[in-house]
Amino acid sequence: MLIYMIPGGCRPLFYLLAMVLTLVSPHTLNHHEHQDHSEKERPKLLLVSFDGFRWDYIYRVPTPNFRSIMDEGVKVEFVENIYITKTYPNHYSMVTGLYAEMHGIVANEMYDPALNLSFSMETDSVYDSRWWEQAVPLWVTVQKDGGRSGAAMWPGSDVLIHGMFPTQYLQYNASVSFETRVQQIIEWFSAPKGEAVDFGILYWEEPDESGHNLGPQSPLMDAIIAGIDEKLGFLMNELKKSGLYEKVNLIVTSDHGMAQLSPEKIIELDQYLDRDLYTWVDKSPVVGILPKEGKFDEVYGLLADANPNLVVYRKDDIPEHFHYQHNVRIMPILLEAKEGWTIMQNRTGLFMLGNHGYNNTLRDMQPIFVARGPAFRQNYVKTSMRSVDLYPLMCHILAIRPLPNNGSLLNVQDLLSLEPTTSTPISTHFTVPPKIHRYSYAPVVGSFIGVVMVLGFLVVYVILVTLKQRPALKHRSWEMSQPLLQEDLHL
């Protein structure tokens, strides 16, 4: 009805104005956002972990494929992973950006007194969702953002976490070859539009297994390391053959390093402590001790000065820089062997020549980190980073909003070919980097300019008509046109 309240000569301009306004309606804005979100090709990222690949292995034997990635991309010389330097805690930190005390996977072997359950990477207890749901892994976040993920044997990726599996995943089976895992990942990335994954994670058990059995100082490790480089070369060639090499951002890293052990360096708990006084949780070199009820003071007193190569912590006294204190799954007493030493109850147990899990500031515990792709700089070497910084970096590359985490994009933004225009404060606590929008503002800006122009013409036209026909408009009130401009147009 309001169209009949303005002079007939103004009606064409009103129709034009109404048509332009529809361009900036909420429906139209949502349409542009949805269109850009769904039709624009999402960034691609593949995260690869070679379990137990120590930082210095690439210098030990010729590793041309690692070198190629370094030349084409970036390398970080010193990566401080999380405490404890075990497989499950560190792999979950990489995909959550959280320290172990925050994400809840505090060891490879755990006891939860609240659940009254035990966890072991060697049993089906790993498939119990309750162990994993103190955090949200990146593949779940990607999928909630509308993306797709693919996981080949990554620890925890075959578990239902917060009601989701990865879009595509392989049930863990150590007998599946690396080449088969790679081919599956390539197939997922190469699927038709709308079915292809945006984020992939790939895990391989070596050189960790050989490092445990042979010891990192063994000359036999040279062939194992060279074999890992060949496997990386296979992955790179498959990416090239499929046309993905220049599209996919590739990060190659590990969970931890490896230390050499000796049968001469064994700490036998049976020499200091009766087994009836405690329950042993997890394995060397960091062992959780759960004293029997009422026996805490006695157990701690017997262990505190038992061996000069054994560090004994009350839970409340674990150093803050370990970020390994505030979780019910961390036992009341923690034993930590010094590097190269092994904690056993007695010498009848299985002994390994190499191990990890020690203090995360030790150089031999550090993993490798190299990356290449459209998001990364070329031939760039960075001195150091923390493994928790990987999560916000991956979220930035994938253009998704990270969940609260212990990392900082600011710490690693120099690895990027185009650094973020907004900074995220460095923090050892939760940080939430700014949301990255994928839709374009061009339609909104253009529509706004159009509205301004039409309004300008309309105002001038109304003024001219008013001046020209003033005698005939004396009975009309200015307030009659006021609601049309202010309320109905929602300017």
Image (cartoon, helix red, strand yellow):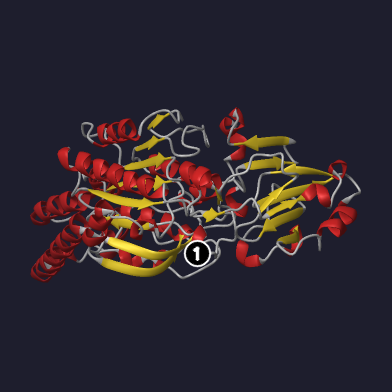
In the depicted view, which residue is nearer to us: 241 or 224? 224
In the depicted view, which residue is nearer to us: 445 or 69? 69
Local packing at callout 1 (Cα closer than 10 Å; few below 14, some 14-19, many 20+) is: some
Image coords of residue 118 (percent x, y)? 69, 36
Image coords of residue 66 (percent x, y)? 28, 54
Question: Can residue 330 be spotted in the picture?
Answer: no
Q: Residue shown at 87%/41% (left/top)?
A: 276
> Split into 4 quadrants, where in the image is the N terminus?
top left
Q: Is residue 237 left or right of residue 62?
A: left
Image coords of residue 414 (percent x, y)? 32, 69
> Label 1 is placed on what type of residue?
Arg
Count of marks overlaid on the render: 1
In the depicted view, which residue is nearer to us: 86 or 106? 86
Secondary structure under tag 1 reads helix
Q: Is residue 50 left or right of residue 418?
A: right
Q: Is residue 472 left or right of residue 404?
A: left
Residue 132 vertical placement versus 158 (above, below): below
Residue 341 lies in quadrant: bottom right
Q: Residue shown at 11%/71% (left/top)?
A: 467
Residue 248 vertical placement versus 380 (above, below): above
Which residue is disc 1 drawn over?
Answer: 363
